[in-house]
Amino acid sequence: MASAQASGSAGVTACPSEDMLLWLEVRTDTDLLAETMDAYAGTGGTLLPLGQFARILDLGIVVAADGRHASGTIDPRTRVTVDLDAGTAQVGATKIALGPGACVRKGDIYLAAETMEKLLPVRLRVAADAQLLQVTPTGTLPLVRNRQVAERRAALSQLAPPETTVMARDPYRAFSIPAVEVNAGQRFGSGEVLQSRWLGVRAAGDLAFAGFRGFVGLDSAGATNIQLTLERTSADNRALGMLGGSRVAVGDVATPDAQLGARSVAGRGIFYSSAPLQAYDFSHPLVLEGDVADGEQIEVYVDGTLRAARAASEGGRYRFDNLSLGIGDHQVRILFYGPQGQVREDVRSFQLGSGLLQPGQTAVRFSVVQPERPLLRMEDGPWPRTGDALRVVALIDRGLSRRVTAHAGLTRFRPWYGQERLAGTAGIKAMLAGAALDGVVGLDSRGGRAASLLAGSRIRGVSVRMLHAEYAGGFVDETRDPMSGGVALRRATEAQVDLAAAFPGGQKMPIAFDIRRIEQQDGTHRVEANARAAAMLGISYVNVMVSRQAWGGGLAGAQHLASIETSTPLAAALQLRTGLAYRITGRPGIESAYVSTQVAMPQGDLQFTVSRQGGMPSRLRLDASYRHRFRRFDLSTAAGYDVRTRSWRAALQVTFAFAQTARQGYGFAPTSVGISGRAAIRTFLDTNGDGHWQPGEKPVGGVQVYTPAGTVTTDAQGRVLAEDLGDTLPAQLRIDASQSSELYLAEMPDAIRLVPRRGRTTPLEIPLRAAGEVEVKLQFATADGAQPLTAVTVELVAERGGTAFPARTDNLGTAMFEGIPPGRYQLRLLPAQASQLHLALQASEAVEVPAQGGFLRVRPLLAHRVDDE
């Protein structure tokens, strides 16, 4: 046999026996090239197969049919030939002796690793005990070159496989039974002022082909707050059909921030926007708003540092409208602390850009609002600061080129305690030398003038945002100084720096600095500076802030404050929170301090709090509260004692909600249904391929769905209810069926995108398709009989559509195809590799993957050399 032949002069010997066979893993420092490759332990060292190793490296070196000759190229200028009979090889113009141990087995030429290094541009290290062949390229290999090209093009998003996202449509209806949340309570106390009753009702659903939300709050004095809003949102800018729009609302709404002049103010009116729902501009403050449960405390963390905190406002809504952030990605965590220690969070990701639009793209925002007035006013509010004056804001942006966007605005507003005015602005946004710029000029109808320049950039992970504005003629700019009450400004300067400092061990500490200086027209000025940092210390998360506030003019002075807050999980169900605010200058002392212990129980939440408020005199309070979750409602109790005044107070509250459930229809539901949207998910095998569930189609359990609020898993009936998906902003749901009840499933979309609506339970069908797993064995005819053909790419090509599924043969010549959709396919060799290696299949082979999927083993395929025909 050919494998037994030898050439004494050339040192060619018989190959070692099968007892000396090695299987080696082939890898570079960074990549796994092959899980297994044949090798033999010979007297002259480890023998490696030339043909198989060349195919692994994507080199066009082919072993001839006699098994004793090989030829091919390493690159267009370097040709390689091997003549086993002569015991020599030639690389370009260099002749090389094959050395001892060269032999033929199974149609391939085996050479010592040292000889292989002379033929190919590699350095090899064989670790037989670890079954490893370490490859170090010494030249540019086609395998490496192809991967580098693929990586570069993927970085340019030219060849990167796009994420497949399916948009779930949930059209608005004329009417849907709303989700309703009700809370009612009684407050008792040692004084008459502490005794009262209250009732709050929140409802949300579809009405008049729009999303409806409403809130009614009553207390012992009668109706105190009523808010109603109709809203339509559209991720594809069709909120008003042919008229476009990404968001349209009427009722209790808020105006957008102008570039100069009028700030965002809530009230009754209308709102329209054609800007994308998730388009955020670093030149506009970030506005966070939403529904909040009764009695919740709210904290806002930006990239890990505490930026804002406040108690829930009346009307069941919260709003933070002055968060200025720099260019880049920001993670915002909104934590809600309930009065009984319950904690929920809303995590949002914001990508703030330069605000540039595509050439020819236009974005319009328009709003008319009567400030600080609810849609239905049952009694006069305590602060009629703007009278009955309407606030009108009209903003338009237009993309001129990829790097320049023009914008303009027209506003009519009345500042607090000021006179009504009409203001116009115009400006240019641009990218210059990696920095985003926004220059704006403004005039108002009372002779005011203004100009501002905003610059932002992100350099090596450090975000920088700087602004300077000059004013004259009594221009009022609420966006720079919202608490000024309409006082005319002279100039304003802001600077903000955000970074994450790296420490040993891989920990990163988010640090934020900001400073603001406001100078009014009368010469008085105010300076605010803050430094914030956050870090994990042991098991505690610690937030620290140091601030300085200074003012000059008629009353000059300054004060320095420091605060620290910690959150420590003492056990799985036990949380300790502490806080301290300390006045450093003036009259040093504690502004406030608290220690709070929260205990999560299987059926409830318990909280104990000790707090102290500074001042003359200081006050020490003791509070305890408990919420018990019954099957159909929550019952909350609270009690407190003021040590200084020796007064006590207690409260009892019941909360329940009605909404659409996953199976039982309309009924009792979790108390968050009126705050956030939900999805009723069904996963099933889509037998007929229409994308909708039909009676008789098999449910698929065990499918994991990753939602913004966490992971949910479908039950044996293929159903699960995903809670707390948010409201109005698109939510991404990622699907993982790897742990499902079905072994063989076809590829599915990477994500499902939907726009949740508060009070709405969106029915979401996720059709799954059965798939096949196909095993193919590829062989090659040699003098030693049919041998496995390794490191060759085989394709399954769909007869309908021509979609190709590739797989590479292992050291046994076996290729595995996974996730193949039902249908008829043809097997073929990868055309480019087949041409390079002069290979062809002896006969074509068809594969039929049945509708129910499953495992298929195809009969062995025989390949032959085209040169042999």
Image: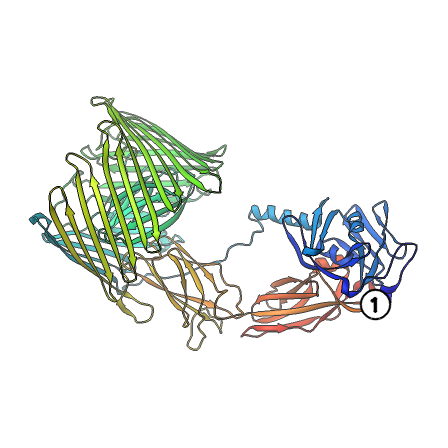
> Picture quarter containing residue 475?
top left
Nearer to me, 477 or 639:
639
Residue 26 left/right relative to 379: right
Q: How is the image coloured?
A: rainbow
Residue at (49, 73) in percent of width and height: 687
* Residue 454 position (above or below residue 245): above
x, y percent for residue 19: 77, 65
Residue sitting at the far right: 9
> Picture quarter containing residue 68?
bottom right
User: Is residue 164 in view from this perspective?
Assistant: yes
* Residue 76 position (above or below residue 424): below
Nearer to me, 840 or 598:
598
How many numbered callouts? 1
Say which element carries label 1. loop
Residue carrying label 1 = 783
* Residue 522 position (above or below residue 109): above
The kind of residue tagged 1 is: Ala
Residue 614 left/right relative to 289: left
Residue at (8, 49) in percent of width and height: 190
**Is the residue marked by circle 1 packed among few (<14), some (14-19), or many (20+) residues within 10 Å?**
some
Nearer to me, 363 or 845:
845
Nearer to me, 190 or 835:
190
Residue 661 left/right relative to 146: left
